[in-house]
Image (cartoon, grey):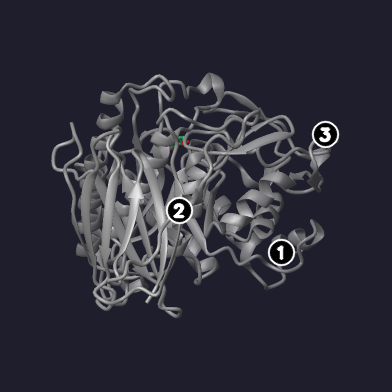
Amino acid sequence: MNQMNQVHVRVHPHVRGPKVERFVYSQFAEHLGRCIYPGIWVGDRKDIPNDGGIRLDVVEALKALEIPALRWPGGCFADNYHWMDGIGPREQRPKRHNLWWKQSESNAFGTHEFLRFCEMIGTEPYICVNVGSGTVEEARSWVEYCNCVEETHLTQLRAQNGAPTPWKVRFWGVGNELWGCGGRMRPDQYADLFCQFANFMRRTDPTIELIACGSSSQNMEYWNEIFLERVFSYRLHHWGPLFEYLAIHHYLGRTLSDLNFTDDDYYGLIGELDQLRKHVEKAAALCRAYSTPDAPIRLIIDEWGTWYVEAVTENGLYQQNTMMDAIVAALGFHLYHDYAEDIFMTNMAQTINVLQALILTKGPKMCKTPTYYVFDLFRGHKDGERLPVDVSSPPLPRVEGRAAVSVSATRAREKGQVTLSLVNAHLEVPASVAIDLGQPVTRVEGRILASDDVHDHNTPDEPERVVPRDCKVAPNADGTVTVELPPHSVAALTVSL
Ligand code: AHR
């Protein structure tokens, strides 16, 4: 290595920007492949330590990440899921066919199990109801079952099933991908159904926050516009706002391989983030246009991440997760920080064993992926105020308009600590990054995720090939900080001023 990119960063720690919502670091888990069974639920298997069927190694790993929200039960599965199948004595629950992911569904993991799992890992549940093949009453009654205090047949049933106290689930999605697996609907058709579902769900519990199904990368040119136009066209909003959030989906790398990728593939994948930015920009502009001061609509990206050619229905959308995924995750979060005013939540797909997973399991073994460690490194950003950052960096090769090094900064509201995340996306050239915060730094600590080869990854048999380590960083005599970033690496610094 005979070259080193020189990068200069100026952070403005006293110009406080919008809050980076902690919900930006949320997750999505669907009844798909091995995500729920056996990623979360192992039933009475003796070889995997569990608490009432929920595997404890996964709980421990996810609890440590403090994931703000978890979306469930799908995905495509949601629009063919009938929630009453998943309550009551487990041995009496009906077996069903998982229509979209072509597997058998035991219904052993239902509402109670999901909400218990959320409690165990300390996350806020986000339930997506069935619009495509369900009824308004089915969706409404699910809200009643989970949230209502008043004594009714359903709340008594909940108590009989072991939960006398309501869970008060805050986030409710009204269907999933209605243009596709959710029912092949037109946006105007979904808009009409959406109003009906949202009306009865909201009336059942006025405190819930509702999420409408927005666009994917394939229909971003028209879906949101037509949907919003239709929902707002009849001025029915004098009944009060119908929803709080519009959710879009965006996957990356659909023509690439998880492990057999070339340098061109890698840079091409990073280039795809520009498409994600366009999608976010377009959807955010519409949310702003339809927001009013007392009824804001904020953006959610409730499915995103890499989806490679290896991930097919037959293998339950399983794929490996390398340092390339870590770089994409980190740059994705930097993009979301740029839209902190607009974005309320993002849910990477999916938590365990599916797509850009945090955890991969094999029988009783598991590993944390490089993407897991990005969530870990970026934890200091949660609920921080975004700070302006000027970065002067050489360009990234083969990706027009992108710098080799990307930096994002937030300041914790109370403690005043600054968190800086840095990504060197260059495949060959390391970077020396000089950071000036405009005042002397008294203390700085850092951790870095780096590996010799961008293809490096962890497996349940070799779980510690890619792990973060402390990074050598100290204040310079002039009060600035210098940090060295190897090629394809992600670092996070905590700075005390
Ligand atoms: O995350 C996998 C699938 O991708 C989801 O079920 C669906 O919503 C999307 O198309």
Q: Closer to the N terminus: mark 1 or mark 2?
A: 1
Q: How far apart are marks 3 and 1 (CA)?
A: 36 Å
Residue 471: mark in rendering: 2
Q: Is mark 2 on a helix, strand or loop?
A: loop
Percent x, y for residue 495? 40, 69
Residue under label 1, please give it. Answer: 155
> Quarter-wise, where is residue 143 in the image?
bottom right
> Quarter-wise, where is residue 229 in the image?
bottom left
Q: Closer to the N terminus: mark 2 or mark 3?
A: 3
Other-residue count near label 1 (Cα within 10 Å), few / some / many at <14 / 14–19 / ≥20: many
Other-residue count near label 2 (Cα within 10 Å), few / some / many at <14 / 14–19 / ≥20: some
Amino acid at pointer 3: Asp
Is 136 placed left or right of 9 in the picture? right
Q: Identify which residue is drawn at 31% across, 29% down.
A: 266
Residue 47: mark in rendering: 3
Amino acid at pointer 1: Thr
